[in-house]
């Protein structure tokens, strides 16, 4: 039996035992090209154990899943053509395979690096919180009548799943009543509004009422028709501006890509409604930029237009976050979806807390930012004062 064959059979035995932790390939041959390493771990996919290969290239990584027999064939091929070293990690021992440039192989056993097994369920493929057969996806034109994703809507489907992942995490970490009231301000065509309702109501069995606020009548009529068609009884859309919204109690307020100061209007309405969770994806950020137009800025970063635009986006959203903190919210700002799919990718989240804010300290921070950039006022400040 050759050393390579013994190594592969040892890998199969450790998987079946189960004693397998992971396997790595290193020291690439010239034939490997830009492929630097391969990492192999167990993953549970559709309740079956598979081998998940991560191919580490010079500029990116690629992942591919195999059945155990297919994975062994792939390993055998890689060891013949692309790598001189391989290490099998099990909880019993480490088995090191070394192949010389002349093709001679040797095996070295060493003490086990790992003493505990990894749960393959932790490495299962990313959970999809919406399925291609969901009725609203078909009704909204994301999937065709057979439930097949329409290619041009792939980014939207990806965005929906990322959004639901974020919202699930935020809702789980926020103290909310059994019956939740959610308002989506500036709901547009309602892709994410429908997705959140379906996820909470139909997949998580939560008692939830969702209202979409939108000024364009044709979109309101369209969304209400789709909601009725899908049997979404507690999802409604209302033709109304954000400024006209006056509900005094809402649990979650969402405002995704509300343009310029419409984001501030939404945050203000959320504060009035004593919302436990505020989720915004700010857009445009014109108010601050127009206010400082013509004022010379000290920072050399603001010499160039594109940097100036991005800087004042950050300034605008930072002040929003600090104002929310003054109102006893914990805040976070993070990426919504990758820049690859949209530049409007920042999410500002505020969660109500019982902890009293340091009003003076936060005022000092806000005033220091405004002074540094020669900003007279932030629109949200004026709303709260009035």
Image (cartoon, helix red, strand yellow):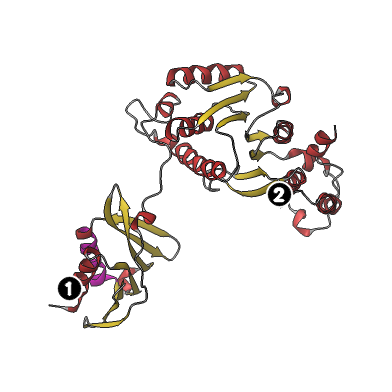
- Residue 31 horizontal side relative to residue 342, left or right: left
- What residue does disc 1 label? 5
Residue 260 visible? The answer is: no
Instruction: Estimate the x, y position of residue 174 in percent, counting from the top left.
Output: 59, 43
Q: Is residue 36 above or below residue 213?
A: below
Check residue 147 for magenta coloring: no
- The numbered mark, 1 or 2, whose residue comes first in the sequence reads 1
Residue drawn at x 65%, y 21% is: 215
Tell me the quadrant of the picture where the C terminus can be found: top right
Query: For this rendering, which residue is in front, 58 or 280?
Result: 280
Left or right of 8 on screen, residue 91: right
Say the numbered circle drawn on residue 314.
Answer: 2
Start-end of magenta stretch: 70-82
CA–CA distance in space, label 1 to label 2: 57 Å
User: Most extreme residue toward the left, as rendered?
Assistant: 1
Q: Considering the numbered disc 2 on the image, is that residue within a helix, a strand or a loop?
A: helix
């Amino acid at each position: 039996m050759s050393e390579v064959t013994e190594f592969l059979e040892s890998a199969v035995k450790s998987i079946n035992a189960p004693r397998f932790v992971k396997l790595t390939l290193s020291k690439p041959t010239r034939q490997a090209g830009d492929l630097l390493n391969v990492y192999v771990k167990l993953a549970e996919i559709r309740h079956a154990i598979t081998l998940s290969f991560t191919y580490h290239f010079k500029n990116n990584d690629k992942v591919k899943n195999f059945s155990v027999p297919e994975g062994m064939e792939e390993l055998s091929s890689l060891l013949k053509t692309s790598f001189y070293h391989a290490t099998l990690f099990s909880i019993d021992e480490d088995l090191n395979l070394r192949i010389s440039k002349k093709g001679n192989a040797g095996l070295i056993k060493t003490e086990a690096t790992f003493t505990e097994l990894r749960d393959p369920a932790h490495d299962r493929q990313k959970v999809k919180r919406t399925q291609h057969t969901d009725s609203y996806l078909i009704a909204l034109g994301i999937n065709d009548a057979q439930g097949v994703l329409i290619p041009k809507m792939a980014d939207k489907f990806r965005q929906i799943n990322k959004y639901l992942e974020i919202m699930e995490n935020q809702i789980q970490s926020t103290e909310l009543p059994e019956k939740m009231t959610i308002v989506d301000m500036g709901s547009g065509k309602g892709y994410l509004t429908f997705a959140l309702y379906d996820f909470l109501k139909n997949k998580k069995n939560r008692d939830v009422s969702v209202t979409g606020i939108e000024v364009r009548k044709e979109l309101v009529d369209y969304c209400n028709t789709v909601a009725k068609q899908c049997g979404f009884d507690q999802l409604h859309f209302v033709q109304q501006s954000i400024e006209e919204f006056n509900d005094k109690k809402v649990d979650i307020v969402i405002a995704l890509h509300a343009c310029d100061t419409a984001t501030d209007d939404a945050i203000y309405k959320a504060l009035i409604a004593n919302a436990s969770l505020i989720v915004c994806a700010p857009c445009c950020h014109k108010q601050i930029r127009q206010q400082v137009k013509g004022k010379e800025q000290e920072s050399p970063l603001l010499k160039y237009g594109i940097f100036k635009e991005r800087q004042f986006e950050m300034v605008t959203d930072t002040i929003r976050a600090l104002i929310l903190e003054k109102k006893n919210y914990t805040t976070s700002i993070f990426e919504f979806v990758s820049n690859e799919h949209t530049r409007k990718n920042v999410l500002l989240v505020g969660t109500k807390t019982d902890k009293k804010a340091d009003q003076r300290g936060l005022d000092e921070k806000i005033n220091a930012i405004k002074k540094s950039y020669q900003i007279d006022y932030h629109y949200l400040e004026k709303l709260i004062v009035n």
